[in-house]
Amino acid sequence: MRQIVAIIPLFVVVSLLVGCSSSRPSLSPVSNQTHLIGEIQESYTVRTGDSLYMIAMEFDLDYLDLARWNGISSPYRIHKGQKLRLHPNSSQSSKPQPVTGDYYIVRPGDTLSVIAERLNIKMANLARWNSLKSPYQIHVGQKLRLRSALSAGQITGVKPKPISKSSKRITAVSRSSAATSMGRPSSGKIIKRYSKERGVTGVEFGGREGDPIVAAGDGKVVYSGTGLVRYGKLLIIKHDNNLLTAYAHNSQLQVREGDVVKIGQQIAAMGKSGTDRVKLHFEVRKNGKPVDPMRYLAKLSGSGR
């Protein structure tokens, strides 16, 4: 009889613990389980603290595609409970066709801001050239002018000035230089290098807790938070329409979303949030996909494994 009495409280305690653990909320807005499955789920429901850039990074998507598929305009605000499509629907392709002329034909899911950012055109100019007024509503099949009538040579007696081959070459060189002019985000030794085969999505720098982390290039902070568990305290900086850098495992975040930063500016302090040792995990993402940072940080030195 005493044995039975002793067993009952133990059973009750175990039941209570199980009940508590099953009702405990997730620590992360994003489950991080999609990569284990190897497929992107059909949709995602926005949670507190999420941003479009963070969600795009989690699922290896281009934030511009994610915005277009869901009809979201710049500055790409989302709200808790919003259901985001993670794939194009049957009438949308994953990438818009390249523009070769002076016009763009509006496709399903397009917004004026997404088109402007994709084509590196100021939205105000795009709206003015097409006589569009706020809220800049456009419709599928609409033909949008991508240049002013003056620059397109469509005013009587005005012809566009031809661009010489040398000018084209100089422009190409300057763009190439800009793409590779990133600075070192940490003075620490490289302890791991990018490897697509081994699933290493960036470069890792060793160091001590509190070591300064600096911006690799000029840009705008588009995410600052802890929404992705495996990245710890994370910063994402947008450098142009298709190039982002990410700084993970920080102990402190010293800039906020919306801040404009300069190359070499301190943005965080090194730490070990979301991992087992002090380090900086640094990624370069182009069109949503992680690429080898050494292509942009060619002068970095240090050993990697």
Image (tube, rainbow, N blue to C red):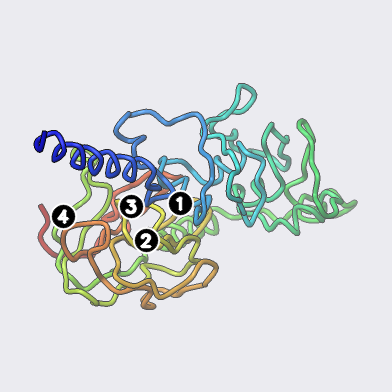
* Relative depth, front residue between 161 and 42: 42
The answer to whether marks 1 and 4 mark residues whose Cβ atoms lie closer than 8 Å is no
| SS at mark 4 in the image | strand
Q: Disc number at residue 292?
A: none
Mark 1 / mark 3, whichever is N-terminal:
1
Q: Mark 3 points at which residue?
A: 229
* Relative depth, front residue between 71 and 162: 71
Q: What residue type is labelled 2?
A: Leu
Mark 1 / mark 4, whichever is N-terminal:
1
| SS at mark 3 in the image | helix
The crowding category of the residue bearing disc 4, from other C-alpha atoms within 10 Å (few below 14, some 14 to 19, many at least 20), is some
Measuring 16% from the left and 66% from the top, which residue is drawn there?
206
The crowding category of the residue bearing disc 2, from other C-alpha atoms within 10 Å (few below 14, some 14 to 19, many at least 20), is many
**Vertical placement of 145 versus 253: above or below?**
above
Mark 2 / mark 1, whichever is N-terminal:
1
Q: What is the spatial separation of the Cα atoms under label 4 and label 3, in whole angstroms?
A: 20 Å
The answer to whether marks 2 and 3 mark residues whose Cβ atoms lie closer than 8 Å is no
Residue furthest front as drawn: 1
The answer to whether marks 2 and 1 mark residues whose Cβ atoms lie closer than 8 Å is yes
Measuring 38% from the left and 28% from the top, which residue is drawn there?
39
User: Which label sits in the foreground, 4 or 3?
Assistant: 3
| SS at mark 1 in the image | helix
**Vertical placement of 254 versus 275: above or below?**
below
Residue 158 image offset from top left, x and y in percent: 83, 55
Q: Mark 1 points at which residue?
A: 54
Q: Mark 2 points at which residue?
A: 234
Q: Mark 4 points at which residue?
A: 192
Q: Which amino acid does label 1 sit on?
A: Met
